[in-house]
């Protein structure tokens, strides 16, 4: 097997609580994810799933431990370098789509590429191609309020892909959808993993997702367990 794309070593994350010291959410996570893997991390509410994904995605720094991408310890970098790394390497999909309501679907997808320095023309062209790939070309000029929940989340997936990331991190991506829309979103994520050789890490409480994953892990009380 290829060497690990992401390695987490002895990750901990503590949060201060006023007048109560601190709460320990991650308690020594060790994890290796290989290029192109489809990994599902299951866990109950409060188990530390989102915290782990935020640390792996460099949105939050660990209290201790290391995260390495291709052998490079990324938390040695300052915040500006980390932000550039996230923009170039990582795509995020969250439970709530966080689309900008005043922008159309096309504009929402194109925006991260423009922030990264791409011209408006090129960004819109790539965004339109992604919307077409995800079956949303006829919704490109619609605002989020004019889209169904499933359509909004697919727009969010397209936005996560616009800078051609190497890894997609998804935090309860279907948690706010009805069962049919959730199933369609799951199938889309598995398909993107296969067709784009995209490394995919999903954290969820949904046990049904296990059928589509290559590897299933479980986080219990801040510790990762193999399933």
Image (tube, rainbow, N blue to C red):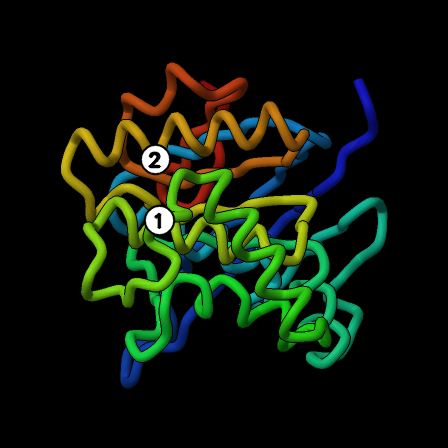
Which of the pair 49/101 is nearer the observer?
101
Marks 2 and 1, how far apart at CA: 18 Å
List the residue tagged with mark 1. Answer: 138
- Crowding near the residue tagged with mark 2, few <14, some 14–19, many ≥20 C-alpha atoms within 10 Å: many
Give the quarter of the figure containing the N terminus. top right
- For mark 1, give the secondary structure: helix
> Which mark's residue is nearer the viewer, 2 or 1?
1
Q: Which image quadrant for residue 110?
A: bottom right
Give the quarter of the figure containing the C terminus. top left
Residue 27 is left or right of residue 167, and the answer is left
List the residue tagged with mark 2. Answer: 185
Residue 204 is left or right of residue 147, and the answer is right
Residue drawn where x is 36% and y is 43% of the image: 221
- Residue 62 shows in this picture: no
Position above or below: 107 against 44: below
Which of the pair 45/190 is nearer the observer?
190
Pointer 2 with pointer 1, Cβ within 8 A? no
- Crowding near the residue tagged with mark 1, few <14, some 14–19, many ≥20 C-alpha atoms within 10 Å: few
- Residue 137 shows in this picture: yes
Position above or below: 6 against 38: below
Residue drawn where x is 50% and y is 38% of the image: 133
Which of the pair 222/105 is nearer the observer?
105
Residue drawn where x is 66% and y is 46% of the image: 8
Image spot of residue 3 (x, y percent): 82, 29
Q: Which image quadrant for residue 175?
A: top left
Q: Which numbered disc, 2 or 1, marks the residue that appears first in the sequence?
A: 1
- For mark 2, give the secondary structure: helix
Image spot of residue 129 (x, y percent): 56, 48
């Amino acid at each position: 097997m290829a060497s690990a794309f992401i390695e987490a070593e002895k990750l901990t994350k503590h949060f201060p609580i006023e007048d109560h010291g601190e709460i320990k959410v991650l308690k020594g996570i060790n994890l290796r994810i290989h290029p192109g893997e489809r990994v599902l991390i299951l866990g109950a509410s409060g188990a530390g799933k989102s915290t782990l994904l935020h640390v792996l995605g460099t949105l939050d720094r660990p209290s201790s431990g290391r995260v390495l991408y291709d052998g490079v310890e990324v938390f040695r970098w300052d915040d500006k370098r980390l932000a550039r790394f996230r923009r170039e390497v990582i795509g995020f999909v969250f439970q709530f789509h966080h689309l900008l309501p005043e922008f159309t679907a096309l504009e929402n997808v194109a925006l991260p590429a423009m922030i990264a320095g791409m011209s408006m023309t090129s960004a819109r062209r790539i965004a339109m191609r992604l919307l077409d790939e995800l079956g949303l070309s006829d919704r490109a000029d619609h605002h989020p309020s004019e889209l169904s929940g499933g359509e909004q989340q697919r727009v969010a997936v397209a936005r996560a892909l616009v800078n051609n990331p190497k890894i997609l991190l998804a935090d309860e991506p279907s948690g706010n959808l009805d069962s049919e829309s959730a199933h369609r979103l799951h199938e889309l994520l598995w398909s993107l993993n296969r067709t784009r050789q995209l490394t995919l890490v999903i954290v969820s409480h949904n046990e049904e997702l296990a059928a589509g994953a290559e590897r299933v892990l479980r986080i219990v009380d801040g510790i990762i367990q193999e399933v």
